[in-house]
């Protein structure tokens, strides 16, 4: 009994000294971790030989790839601005999957998120609708169940991704099982991004159609292994939307709303 008590005491002392030691370390480690930036991947859709959706505005060709890159660059600037991330108490680092007009493979886009330990992957696009009637903003999150909605967007955004994806559909779906746990976080991110974007654009006096946060089976989101959303900024196929999004100052407003939505999601982490 005495012997066991002795061991207990010595063990107790050890625990005591260890807790003292780590107690001293804790303020240092927590100080350093609070300075670690929160990483977000911004993925401008398409690029290079793949223009995405295109439209003509006063003889000028407007390409989705250019709109997406412009919004992504402005969103990064906002996210990395202390005035934006200040309330979080931690800086935000936004990494783009492309910073110029070049093609990026599906694997490289999703590998970005894994390699950089990102908290969120945001693919940025502009929409198109053959009927030319649809307009507004919508944000998709991954649903890898068969009841996935948003069939039109799947067709448009998956057509090219599929061609560039290595492996077949089945392999992609197997890998997507990992993403299952991310569905709820992705839904939350999509809701914050959608609501913030609509509210911010409206607050600037612009008319914008709110198409909501919706689920879809999207190849670019399947393999990211972090919460992932696809943001569709306006319809290039709608004359009013096209006119709006072709203006740089309006893209700035869109990027501000998008950045605010991303930060609202990060604040919940
Ligand atoms: Zn697209």
Image (cartoon, rainbow, N blue to C red):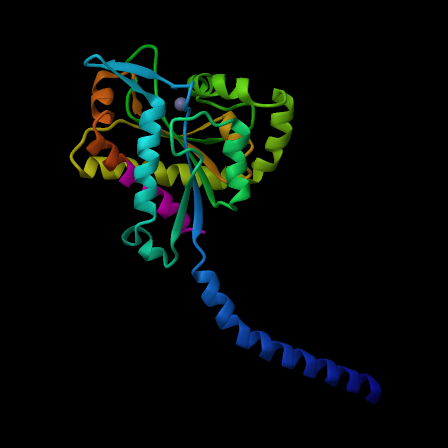
Q: How many marks?
A: 0
Which residues make up the magenta segment? Answer: 255-269
- Magenta residue check for 262: yes
Q: Is residue 49 left or right of residue 85?
A: right
Q: Is residue 37 left or right of residue 209?
A: right
Q: Is residue 174 above or below residue 75?
A: above
Query: Which residue is most to the bottom?
Result: 2
- In the picture, residue 172 is in which quadrant? top right
On-image quarter of the N terminus:
bottom right
Q: Is residue 85 visible?
A: yes
Q: Is residue 160 above or below residue 227?
A: above
Q: Main secondary structure of the magenta part?
A: helix
Q: Position of residue 269 (x, y in %)?
A: 45, 51
Q: Is residue 198 left or right of residue 165?
A: left
Query: Which residue is most to the left?
Result: 205
Q: Nearer the viewer, residue 196 or 63?
A: 63
Which residue is pictured at 54% across the width and 43% down the height? 115
- In the picture, residue 129 is in which quadrant? top left
Q: Position of residue 193 (x, y in %)?
A: 35, 38
- In the picture, residue 134 is in which quadrant? top left
Quarter of image, ligand 1: top left
Q: Position of residue 12 (x, y in %)?
A: 70, 81
Q: Is residue 128 above or below residue 120?
A: above
Q: Is residue 127 above or below residue 115?
A: above
Q: Position of residue 15 (x, y in %)?
A: 67, 78
- Magenta residue check for 106: no
Q: Nearer the viewer, residue 207 or 228?
A: 228
Which residue is pictured at 61% across the width and 21% down the height? 169
């Amino acid at each position: 009994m005495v012997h066991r008590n002795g061991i207990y005491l010595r063990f107790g002392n050890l625990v005591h000294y260890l807790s003292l030691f780590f107690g001293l370390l804790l303020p240092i480690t927590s100080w350093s971790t609070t300075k670690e930036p929160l990483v977000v991947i911004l993925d401008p859709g398409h690029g290079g030989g793949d223009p995405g959706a295109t439209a003509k505005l006063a003889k000028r060709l407007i390409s989705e790839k250019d709109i997406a890159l412009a919004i992504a660059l402005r969103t990064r600037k906002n996210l990395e601005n202390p005035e934006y991330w200040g309330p979080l108490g931690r800086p935000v680092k936004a990494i783009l999957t492309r910073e110029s007009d070049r093609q990026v493979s599906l694997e490289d886009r999703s590998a970005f998120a894994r390699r950089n330990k990102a908290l969120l992957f945001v693919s940025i696009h502009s929409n198109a609708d053959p009927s030319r009637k649809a307009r507004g903003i919508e944000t998709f999150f991954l649903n890898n169940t068969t009841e996935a909605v948003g069939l039109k967007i799947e067709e448009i955004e998956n057509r090219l991704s599929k061609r560039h994806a290595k492996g077949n559909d089945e392999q992609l779906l197997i890998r997507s099982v990992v993403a299952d746990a991310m569905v709820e976080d992705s839904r939350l991110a999509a809701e914050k991004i959608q609501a913030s974007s609509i509210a911010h654009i409206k607050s600037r006096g612009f008319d914008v159609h709110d198409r909501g946060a919706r689920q879809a089976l999207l190849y670019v989101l399947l393999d990211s292994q972090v919460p992932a959303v696809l943001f569709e900024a306006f319809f290039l196929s709608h004359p009013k939307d096209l006119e709006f999004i072709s203006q740089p100052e309006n893209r700035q407003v869109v990027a501000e709303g998008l950045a605010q939505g991303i930060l609202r999601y990060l604040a919940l982490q």
